[in-house]
Amino acid sequence: MNLATSTTTPRHGLMPLNPSSSAASSLRRSLFASLRKISPLTPMASAPASAALSTAAPADNGAAKPAEKQPVQVAKRLEKFKTTIFTQMSMLAVKHGAINLGQGFPNFDGPDFVKEAAIKAINAGKNQYARGYGVPELNSAVAERFLKDSGLQVDPDKEVTVTSGCTEAIAATILGLINPGDEVILFAPFYDSYEATLSMAGADVKAITLRPPDFAVPLEELKAAVSKNTRAIMINTPHNPTGKMFTREELEFIADLCKENDVLLFADEVYDKLAFEADHISMASIPGMYERTVTMNSLGKTFSLTGWKIGWAIAPPHLTWGVRQAHSFLTFATSTPMQSAAAAALRAPESYFEELKRDYGAKKALLVDGLKAAGFIVYPSSGTYFVMVDHTPFGFDNDIEFCEYLIREVGVVAIPPSVFYLNPEDGKNLVRFTFCKDDDTLRGAVDRMKAKLRKK
């Protein structure tokens, strides 16, 4: 496997700033001030098409006069979710020609054998709507892979639901199983989709903060957070953005809480094949947990095909029912030829996954060594393709100020992770880098940081 080619593919961004706190508002104003210098972006950028097209109206004398700008319209449940931090940082990156180690998509392509399987499926006429919950060959391949990885045997037709990426699996799970007023516990920092979708479901969100250096779960704090209203706990292991892998002790503690309080468990495991220092443990494999767990995964991270948006949810039939009800009215079905190719991917020999881990391990070492040499405090990353660091040696008040400086003056993009917390103050000293880039890109970014960053 060669993870060192250089084809760039765009990807959506992550968590928006949380305007519910004064700290978040202060951080956000700093970043938006920079954005205004780059682009005439205003709230009108997301206005309805009809408003955008109506740029002029005839005056009484027949001449055109500017039409009044219409305020953007959005449901109250989504008012707090503004332009994502990835969109904001990418705008600055383009302006300043910075190397992007912020967004979590590879700048190299996926394996040829998977792409060739997609072409073969297209040429074979597999181009119409797929069965709503997945083409049989992919459902079977998911079940086979899950058996190899977790030791659990599942029914591909009754317990596997194919979705348009893991993000849709998350949405279908939450919208299909969570009611307004249900309480759901997240671990901060967290992927943006969690809070946004829970908001659409009308859920109440609690967050337990994972703190450096090891981002361990504060077990007693978690126990105290579970209440009679708690419907579900959501975990992501390996964990974006920290690179943490939940330990068996932590998983068993969470499992006991779920069983004692009749709580569901939603497990996002998209980085399961990028576990460097310990074997990945699927929460569903913990005794007594399969019956209350929805396990979500996708093709994109493991096979560097993030643009294909092929994901799935695995759950017992009584939970699969709710997931499929929501899925039916979200996307109904997922790309047919890409599902056939995904089946071929999941049946790859074990050597593929071993080489993937080896290649990413080398990239991780390259970036981590470079970040340490540049002066960062680097925290351990046991999984994913992300590394969290402490930027405070360089004298900045918060992560957004530092990332802004890093783009403008150094020419490197990182992500300010305060946007991944309910309380942005918890993440203001941290910065997230990704190493899912070719080696030349990683070396170029490291060289810029070593040459231009100075401790204060």
Image (cartoon, rainbow, N blue to C red):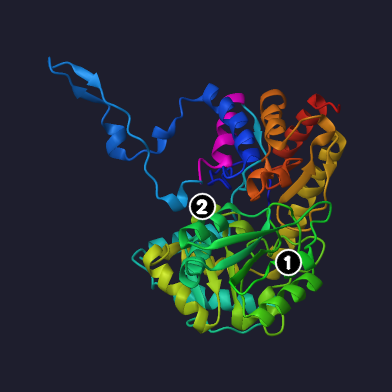
Q: Which residues are magenta?
A: 81-96
Q: Nearer the viewer, residue 264 or 166?
A: 264
Check if residue 254 falls in the magenta segment. Answer: no
Tell us which disc is closer to us: 1 or 2: 1
Image x and y of residue 287, in percent: 71, 84
Rendered residue at 74%/64% (across/down): 354
Q: Amino acid at mark 1?
A: Leu
Q: Height in image: 248 above or below 398?
A: below
Q: Nearer the viewer, residue 76 or 452?
A: 76
Image x and y of residue 258, in percent: 67, 77
Q: Nearer the viewer, residue 222 or 377?
A: 222
Residue 222 numbered tag: 1
Q: Quadrant of residue 350?
A: bottom right
| Mark 1 surroundings within 10 Å by alpha-carbon count, few (fewer than 14), some (14 through 19), many (20 or more) | many
Task: Kindly identify which residue carries mark 2.
Answer: 307
Q: Secondary structure at mark 1?
A: helix
Q: Height in image: 204 above or below 57?
A: below
Q: Quadrant of the C terminus?
A: top right
Rendered residue at 58%/47% (across/down): 15
- Residue 331 seen from this side: no
N-term mark: 1 or 2: 1
Image x and y of residue 333, in percent: 40, 66
Rendered residue at 55%/62% (across/down): 204
Tell me the distance, in whole angstroms, between the alpha carbons under discs 1 and 2. 36 Å
Q: Height in image: 354 above or below 401?
A: below
Number of disc labels: 2
Q: Secondary structure at mark 2?
A: helix
